[in-house]
């Protein structure tokens, strides 16, 4: 299997660095091929702007999606973006390794998403979600947090982790066609003892050793939606973030069922 790890932490000796190093060893020891995009080490340009496009579709105003599609069609994608797209094309599995900052990913990783998973490459009109261009590939998040796991439970002050990661799981990965594997979290590694950090590494190694056995996260297929892209009246929402009033369902019912099944309905 070909695995791309997109690593987004500014400190090489961070626990994120330890997780990426462990993933490299574990996957290679199991015969997989691994590439790492260390975004800070690469000095990755995070901003999507006109400088990305040497051949413009429209020089009078900047419309990012139009320029991205034009660049893909005319093979004029910026060299740094094209290099990353080639890695994504090569990969069977993409792992995003990052600390949760402000309930999301670091800006440099969001910039990688903005520029690399572009219109015309990862998705296009009529090719989104289960028809996205990256269909057949898998993706997984490995994250660290600054606070304890209890804060990320359904009744925690920060909210359920699956809900926090929904914009990434659904709006980035599933949207572009990836099959999304359950995330793995290392809870506040900077504040726990060495024994717990070793346990986090062991847990991650165990996860990586059983990737083929993981049940993906559930996302409703296209046939569950009507022409307005809303869940049909008889469909019970199963994502935990969605709920379907037209099926007599409340958000609380959906979230409770989702939590009871550990996010894999």
Image (cartoon, rainbow, N blue to C red):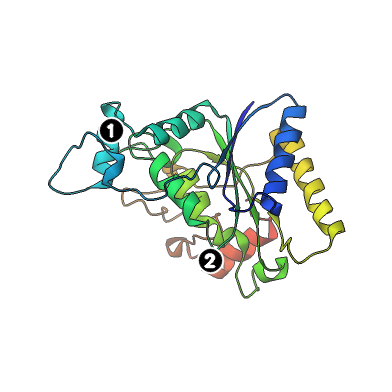
Picture layout, residue 234 above or below residue 87: below
The part of the image, by quadrant, that contains residue 222 is: top left
Picture layout, residue 244 above or below residue 227: below
On the image, the x and y values in percent for residue 135 come to: 48, 33
The part of the image, by quadrant, that contains residue 165 is: bottom right
On the image, the x and y values in percent for residue 57 come to: 18, 37
User: Crowding near pointer 1: few (<14 within 10 Å), some, many (20+)?
Assistant: many
Q: Which SS class for mark 2?
A: loop
* Residue annotated with mark 1: 71
Q: Please give left or right for residue 265 compared with residue 243 in the image.
A: right
Image quadrant containing the N terminus: top right
On the image, the x and y values in percent for residue 94 come to: 57, 37
- Give the spatial CA distance, label 1 vs label 2: 32 Å
Q: Please give left or right for residue 80 compared with residue 196 in the image.
A: left
Q: Which SS class for mark 1?
A: helix
Residue lying furthest left = 60
* Residue annotated with mark 2: 102
> What residue sits 79% from the left and 64% below the top?
192
User: Is residue 224 or residue 205 the one in the foreground?
Assistant: 205
The reply to whether dot 1 and dot 2 touch (C-beta < 8 Å) is no
Picture layout, residue 185 above or below residue 23: below
The part of the image, by quadrant, that contains residue 188 is: bottom right
User: Is residue 204 or residue 156 the one in the foreground?
Assistant: 204
First along the sequence among labels 1 and 2: 1
> What residue sits 83% from the left and 52% below the top?
198
**Disc on res. 130:** none
């Amino acid at each position: 299997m070909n695995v791309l790890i997109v690593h987004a932490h500014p400190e090489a000796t961070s626990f994120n660095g330890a997780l990426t190093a462990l993933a490299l060893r574990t996957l290679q020891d199991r015969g997989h091929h691994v590439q790492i995009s260390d975004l800070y080490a690469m000095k990755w340009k995070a901003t999507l702007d006109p400088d990305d496009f040497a051949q413009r579709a429209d020089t009078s105003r900047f419309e990012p999606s139009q320029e991205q599609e034009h660049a893909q069609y005319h093979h004029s994608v910026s060299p740094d973006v094209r290099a990353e797209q080639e890695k994504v094309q090569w990969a069977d599995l993409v792992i995003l390794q990052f600390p949760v900052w402000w309930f999301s990913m670091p800006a440099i990783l969001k910039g990688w998403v903005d520029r690399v998973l572009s219109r015309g490459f990862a998705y296009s009109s009529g090719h989104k979600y289960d028809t996205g261009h990256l269909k057949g590939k898998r993706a997984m998040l490995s994250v660290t947090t600054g606070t304890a796991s209890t804060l990320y439970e359904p009744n925690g002050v920060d909210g359920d982790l699956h809900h926090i990661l929904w914009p990434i799981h659904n709006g980035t990965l599933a949207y572009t066609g990836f099959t999304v594997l359950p995330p793995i979290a290392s809870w506040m590694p900077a504040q726990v003892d060495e024994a717990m950090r070793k346990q986090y590494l062991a847990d991650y190694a165990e996860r990586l050793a059983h990737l083929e056995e993981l049940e993906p996260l559930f996302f409703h297929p296209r046939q569950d939606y009507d022409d307005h892209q809303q869940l049909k009246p008889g469909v019970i929402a199963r994502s935990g973030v969605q709920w379907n009033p037209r099926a007599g369902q409340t958000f609380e019912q959906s979230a409770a069922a989702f939590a009871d099944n550990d996010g894999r309905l």
